[in-house]
Amino acid sequence: MSQHFQFQLTATDGLARRGEITMPRGNVRTPAFMPVGTAGTVKAMYLDQVRDLGSDIILGNVYHLMLRPGAERVARLGGLHEFARWPHPILTDSGGFQVMSLAALRKLDEKGVKFRSHLDGSEHALTPERSIEIQGLLDSDIQMQLDECIRLPAERAEIERAMEMSLRWAERCAVAFGDQPGKAMFGIVQGGDLIDLRIRSAERLAAMDLKGYAVGGLAVGEPQAVMLATLDETLPVLPTKKPRYLMGVGTPQDILRSVARGIDMFDCVMPTRSGRHGLAFTRFGKVNLKNARHAEDSRPLDETSDCPASRDYSRAYLHHLVRANEALASMLLTWNNLAYYQSLMAGIRAAIEGGQFEAFAAQTEEDWARGDISPL
């Protein structure tokens, strides 16, 4: 473990990158998938399980934790690592996306954003400085700038206004963050689906010489092709020797195709949310356990998996749990899904190291497309 925040590229294969982030609380092998622990918990999972699956880092969120239980309370209780019993690295999202998607009656100006809580209607204010302060109280290892994320499609003038605001907020966040040994603040590239704005945002953030960079404002309903085209044009502008994080992405295919373009870090609620709704991710593609065809299927989701949820429970039993709305269904399917995501990331890392990423990606997509047809 390093007492400083460092990122080292250890291998490349085409544009795909294998690297490692070192921090005082541990190392993060990249490409990395970060399970989302929005409110200090990865839903339906013990954090020891999350670690055992291969997760080096999890994500927490300013918006949710500032509302409940409160950042100052978490600080008094020893910080988020102690509070949640996760002694490894944590990245905190600044709360900007949640303010856009969850808060009621939000009012945004140059200073920041005022909003009403989706929990109880109470009024709150979030400025770039306050977002960084909260992330400091949580004691997170990677902190994100506050940005304005807007829904697509949107008019050019609105996208440009939000992008320019986010750049000014990035500068304020950088000042508020200061010099924190062993920690990092990442800037967030915005610009919607307009390539020239994305490039302008990336260039100006790169000039700030931050420790890492995220691409935000994607995975908000645009087609995958638009997201990938945006990455194709944006990533070459970002510094090569710093980590690149694609926020809120995504499906296994999104991840595979984004790694091929040079992304190092991902987060998404998809594996946990899908697990709570009866959907399993496997090396054969998606398996919807709500479907009646699984009712008498004695096979596990994947007999070759190291994860007990994937290997030791029949599809028939999982189908029964889902249809009966049992809590164990969410627990087992979330466990399976996170196991598959981390297995995919391990396979990606090994393929890049071996110079076989293109072949690995093609075979993985072929397996998903072929699927897994039940013999029943």
Image (cartoon, rainbow, N blue to C red):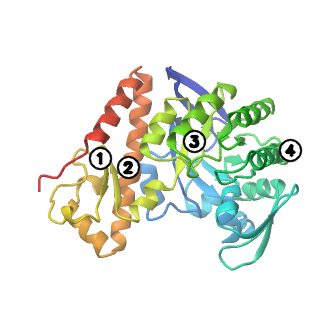
Estimate how packed mark 4 is, as few (under 14), some (14 to 19) or many (20 or more) residues with alpha carbons within 10 Å: few
216 vs 46: above or below:
above
Contact between marks 4 and 3 (CB within 8 A): the answer is: no
Residue for badge 4: 175
Measured in 3D between alpha carbons, the distance from the residue under mark 2 to the one under mark 4, in whole angstroms, is 39 Å
Estimate how packed mark 2 is, as few (under 14), some (14 to 19) or many (20 or more) residues with alpha carbons within 10 Å: many
Nearer the observer, disc 3 or disc 2?
2
Estimate how packed mark 1 is, as few (under 14), some (14 to 19) or many (20 or more) residues with alpha carbons within 10 Å: some
In the image, which disc is placed on residue 263? none
Contact between marks 1 and 2 (CB within 8 A): the answer is: yes
Indicate which disc, 4 or 1, sits on the residue closer to the N terminus: 4
Residue for badge 1: 306
Measured in 3D between alpha carbons, the distance from the residue under mark 4 to the one under mark 1, in whole angstroms, is 45 Å
Contact between marks 3 and 1 (CB within 8 A): the answer is: no
Residue for badge 2: 339
Measured in 3D between alpha carbons, the distance from the residue under mark 4 to the one under mark 3, in whole angstroms, is 26 Å
Nearer the observer, disc 1 or disc 2?
2
- Identify the image quadrant of residue 102: bottom right
Residue for badge 3: 26
Estimate how packed mark 3 is, as few (under 14), some (14 to 19) or many (20 or more) residues with alpha carbons within 10 Å: some
